[in-house]
């Protein structure tokens, strides 16, 4: 495929990823481990390539969501420790052990099942215990009236044979959001997490790796670093505050102007005829649509970077195409590259137009959009 034949594509910058890793690592206390979150195909950036860069750079751990993601990395030669944050059926305990994969354990019953299978195999499974301190998702529930029961079950799980309890972790619900109430809630989650660790410690349980620092905590609560940090979105250079840290976007999604047409005032554009030209209009057709991951909800609410400036998107976004107004950008021509998001076109602005968060748009870039490693 020639450069001109490409409809749309995503460029992934290894240099920017390495820059972000080193910048974030410098922000951590000495001795604090670094876990790179590469679940969901590294937020759309390509898990294998991202993991390889982090492994060579000296990161300590990787995190994925499921067994398939972990095995995919192992199949491509990634040897560094991998933590599965989500559920894995205990029937796959042997695969976890065989491939040296660490599993999160979210409750006593689950721990007992893993223990039984590991013992039957005559092997040991490395695990990190998940503690629910207020996310209300996975983990040993240890909030409020459930504290003592949660700690008791956690200690019982840690003492089960066949399990090597390497770590303990929790996840913050609002560490990335502003406001006194959000800060109070986050600090209470942290207090609860430390209290759980202390209570377990009085019963002889020690955790070599304690971790809770996600993206929001790294930005707003540096004292939460403990033994390991696991920034997600920040690693890829996104979020409203990424620029303050000098981080750089690692992906830019590109397309081309495939056609330029001229329309008289009063011409309706695209499905539903929701946009009508108010003047003589020079309209460009781009080779990207909602099947490529550009949300239809962004229709008429976003702009993309072309030669000379930002081109407003017009009319409903189609499955494979969308239109942009080039009237005020005479330098933009057929065949020119267009940046949907990246250094020139802000992903945060696009996510606001889609009424969502940058995470979702990064993960939404579809598999039919080819990725290529290219520094920009």
Image (cartoon, rainbow, N blue to C red):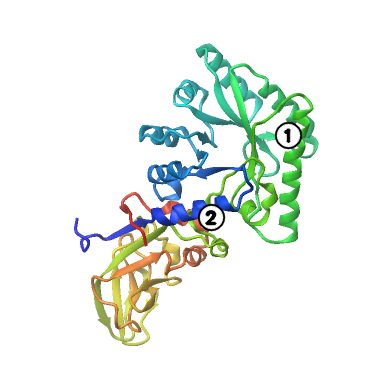
Q: Tell me the tag on residue 23.
A: 2
Q: Dot 1: what SS? A: helix
Tell me which residue sits at (75%, 57%) in the image: 181
Pick whichever, 123 or 322, lies toward us: 123
The residue identified by callout 1 is 197
Vertical arrangement, residue 127 with respect to residue 304, above or below = above
Q: In front of the other: label 2 or label 1?
A: 2
Residue at image coords 68%, 47%: 224
- Residue 344, placed above or below residue 151: below
Confirm whether residue 251 shows in the render.
Answer: yes
- Real-space Cα separation, disc 2 to disc 1, in angstroms: 30 Å
Q: In percent of the image, x 59 and y 21: which residue is there?
A: 163
Q: Position of residue 182 (x, y in %)?
A: 71, 56
- Across and down, in percent, residue 62 comes to 50, 39
Figure check: 314 above or below 57: below
Q: Quadrant of the C terminus?
A: bottom left
């Amino acid at each position: 495929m020639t450069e001109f034949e490409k409809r749309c594509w995503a460029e992934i910058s290894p240099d920017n990823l390495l820059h972000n890793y080193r910048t974030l690592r410098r922000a951590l206390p000495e001795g604090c481990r670094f876990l790179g979150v590469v679940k969901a195909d590294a937020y759309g950036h390509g898990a294998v390539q991202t993991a390889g860069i982090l492994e060579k750079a000296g990161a300590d751990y990787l995190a994925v969501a499921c067994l398939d993601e972990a095995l995919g990395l192992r199949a491509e030669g990634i040897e560094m420790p991998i933590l599965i944050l989500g559920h894995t059926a205990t029937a796959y305990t042997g695969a976890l052990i065989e491939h040296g994969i660490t599993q999160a354990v979210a409750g006593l019953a689950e721990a007992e099942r893993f223990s039984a299978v590991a013992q039957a195999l005559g092997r040991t499974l490395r695990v990190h215990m998940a503690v629910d301190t207020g996310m209300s998702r996975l983990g040993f529930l240890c909030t409020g009236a459930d504290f003592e029961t949660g700690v008791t079950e956690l200690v019982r799980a840690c003492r089960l044979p066949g399990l090597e309890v390497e770590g303990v972790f929790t996840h913050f619900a609002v560490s990335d959001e502003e406001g006194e109430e959000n800060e109070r809630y986050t600090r209470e989650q942290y207090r609860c997490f430390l209290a759980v660790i202390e209570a377990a410690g009085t019963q002889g349980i020690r955790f070599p790796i304690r971790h809770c620092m996600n993206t929001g905590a790294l930005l707003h609560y540096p004292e939460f670093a403990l033994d390991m940090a696991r920034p997600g979105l920040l690693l890829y250079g996104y979020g409203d505050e990424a620029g303050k840290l000098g981080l750089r976007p690692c992906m830019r999604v590109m397309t081309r102007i495939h056609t330029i047409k001229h329309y008289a005032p009063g011409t309706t554009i695209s499905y539903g005829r929701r946009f009508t030209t108010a003047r003589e209009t020079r309209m460009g057709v781009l080779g990207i649509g909602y099947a490529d991951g550009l949300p239809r909800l962004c229709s008429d609410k976003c702009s993309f970077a072309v030669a000379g400036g930002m081109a407003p998107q017009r009319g409903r976004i189609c499955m494979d195409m969308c239109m942009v107004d080039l009237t005020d950008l005479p330098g933009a021509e057929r065949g020119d590259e267009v940046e949907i998001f990246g250094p020139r076109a802000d992903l945060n602005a696009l996510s606001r137009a889609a009424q969502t968060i940058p995470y979702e748009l990064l993960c939404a870039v579809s598999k039919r959009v080819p990725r290529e490693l290219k520094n920009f």
